[in-house]
Amino acid sequence: MVEPENKLFALKDGWASEETKEEQRLKALSELGLRQPETIPVFEEATQTAAHFLEAPISILGFVDCDRHWFKSAVGLSRLGLMNQLAQTRQLLRRESFCSQVVENSQILVINDTHNFVAGENSATSKLVQDYGIRAYLGAPLIDAWGNCLGALAVMDLMPRNFTTRDIEFLQIIARWSMSEFERNRLLQGGAQ
């Protein structure tokens, strides 16, 4: 009779603690070079495509680290006021960003009217509403090949709107495409070196 090999088994995602998941997520951000300030063309294309096809005045693609949400690409931030702080810094505190909720839940977030949404327990994000006049938000998770939700692709509007199922599906497709294309390009560049 042959004895089975002794093996250590990694915990399944459902068993991993929230702390462990967050550590893995932050490690993936660093390993993929997404904490670097350079522009990434596929992310620029994703925000422009989302803004255009969803007819949204603002689109951002950003990543969330421990304390902040920073934008790798943004369209329309100047509509929030010439030389506004958000357009200049291209970042928000994590607690002030709707995108952090997308990351924490690894799910799409639909807010047709922020005045109804912020009134409850989500008042931490009221800076976007009070300071910048954001009235509608739709965000899709940016998930890497290992299943880490690293950030979000989002569109925002200065008026309430009803996002359709088609709007939601389109944004999800663009978010998936942009991450897979980014990772594919990264692998091809690594193989060429």
Image: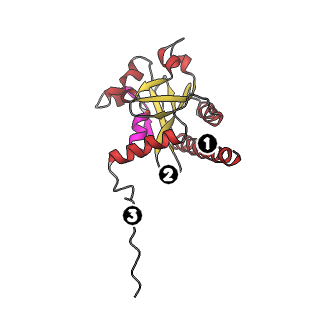
**Mark 2 closeness class: few <14, some 14–19, many ≥20 residues within 10 Å:** few
The one nearer the camera, 115 or 107, is 107
The segment highlighted magenta reads: 100-115
Alpha carbon distance from label 2 to label 3:
17 Å
Dot 2 or dot 1: first in sequence order is 2
Determine the residue positioned at 38% across, 18% down. Answer: 130
Picture layout, residue 123 above or below residue 192? above
Mark 2 sits on what residue? Answer: 146
Q: Are marks 1 and 3 in contact (CB under 8 Å)?
A: no
Look at the image and tell me in which quarter the N terminus lies. bottom left
**Mark 3 closeness class: few <14, some 14–19, many ≥20 residues within 10 Å:** few
Dot 1 or dot 3: first in sequence order is 3
Alpha carbon distance from label 1 to label 3:
30 Å
Horizontal and vertical percent position of residue 170: 57, 42
Mark 1 sits on what residue? Answer: 182
Q: Secondary structure at mark 1?
A: helix
Determine the residue positioned at 28% across, 31% down. Answer: 121
